[in-house]
Image (cartoon, rainbow, N blue to C red):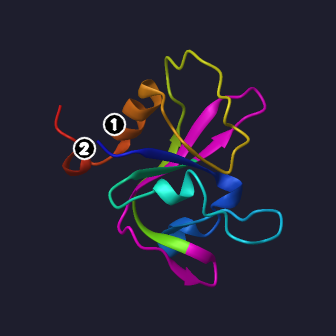
Amino acid sequence: MSAFFGIDEHNAQGFIDHNVVCLPHMPDEKPDLHATVASIKNEDVVFIKHCTEQMELHIKAVGLVQSDYPTENEMGICLPVKWLWQGEKVPVNFDEAVPLCGEALYEEHNILVQREILDLLPPQYRPPH
């Protein structure tokens, strides 16, 4: 199964319009190409998230990465994404705190959140059960 990567909505303006996900920048304005970023691959699931002050996770968009190879454009270093769902979804039965709410980009390991994200995808993009 693909990996899941959450992207903070404040760092995602324009991603949907340009069908991309761009790598976050370090404080010196250089792209952060380490750890999580380097592991994003073709067909991984990416989602744009928003966290409320009460630490509730809201899913705003879900897409699939379309290539292993980033390109550079006016938005930075980006991977092409096919955005398949947009809206507002709050995962139910989410029984743990959201420790990564403040992270611009992170890999989502919570199986309950992963299932909620998969359920938002059109049926032809969901893995077989």
Q: Which residue is mark 1?
A: 119
Residue drawn at 65 percent across, 43 percent down: 50
Q: Which residue is mark 2?
A: 126
Residue type beneath disc 2 = Arg
Q: Would you call the spot at circle 1 few (<14 residues within 10 Å), some (14-19), or many (20 or more)? A: few
Residue type beneath disc 1 = Asp
Residue 86 sits above or below residue 117 on the image = below
Place of residue 48 in the rendered image (x, y in percent of width and height, measured from the top left): 56, 51
Q: Which of the numbered marks, if any, corresponds to residue 100?
A: none
- Look at the numbered discs 2 and 1 and tell me whether their residues touch, using CB distance below 8 Å: yes
Viewer-side label of 2, 1: 2
Residue 7 sits above or below residue 31 on the image = above
Q: Is residue 112 magenta?
A: no
Q: Residue furthest right?
A: 28
Magenta range: 49-77
Quadrant of the drawing holding the C terminus: top left
Q: Earlier in the sequence, mark 2 or mark 1?
A: 1
Quadrant of the drawing holding the N terminus: top left
Number of marks: 2
Residue drawn at 42 percent across, 27 percent down: 111
